[in-house]
Amino acid sequence: MPTVAVPPREATVSSRGGELIGEVPPSPAGPIGEDEAATLPLPPEVGLPRALQVMRFSVSQIEFVFGGRRHA
């Protein structure tokens, strides 16, 4: 049976203490600055009470999310 060599990860979380071991290079995608974040559109607002939103989301997540986007 062939074996596959798996390269070591650059950073892992210790199962005992939760501290990081190693270092991961920063992402080229982010983070963005506060000035750029202020230009992003807000998520669509759903005009329902919070409890009803949670119930509808828990029953049908896809319909709830895309329905909210359609009605925005």
Image (tube, grey):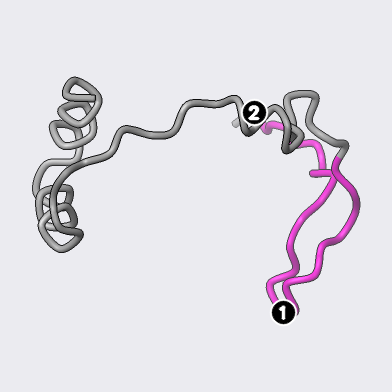
- The vertical placement of 54 against 42, above or below, is below
Callout 2 secondary element:
loop
Residue in the foreground of this view, choosing between 64 and 71: 71
Of badges 1 and 2, the one in the foreground is 1
| Rendering quarter of residue 68 | top left
| Residue denoted by label 2 | 2
Could you tell me if residue 8 is visible in this image? yes
53 horizontally vs 4: left or right: left
- The vertical placement of 54 against 35, above or below, is below
Query: Mostly what secondary structure, the magenta segment?
Result: loop
| Rendering quarter of residue 50 | bottom left
Instruction: Tell me the residue at 88%/37% (across/down).
Output: 25
72 horizontally vs 17: left or right: left
- The vertical placement of 71 against 6, above or below, is above
Residue in the foreground of this view, choosing between 54 and 58: 54
Residue in the foreground of this view, choosing between 29 and 37: 37
Magenta segment: 3-24
In which quadrant is the N terminus drawn? top right
| Residue denoted by label 1 | 16
- Badge 1 crowding class, 10 Å Cα cut-off, few under 14, some 14 to 19, many 20 or more, is few
Q: Earlier in the sequence, mark 1 or mark 2?
A: 2
Instruction: Tell me the residue at 64%/33% (across/down).
Output: 37
Point out residue 34 in the picture as x, y percentages from the top left corner.
Answer: 72, 38
- The vertical placement of 60 against 52, above or below, is above
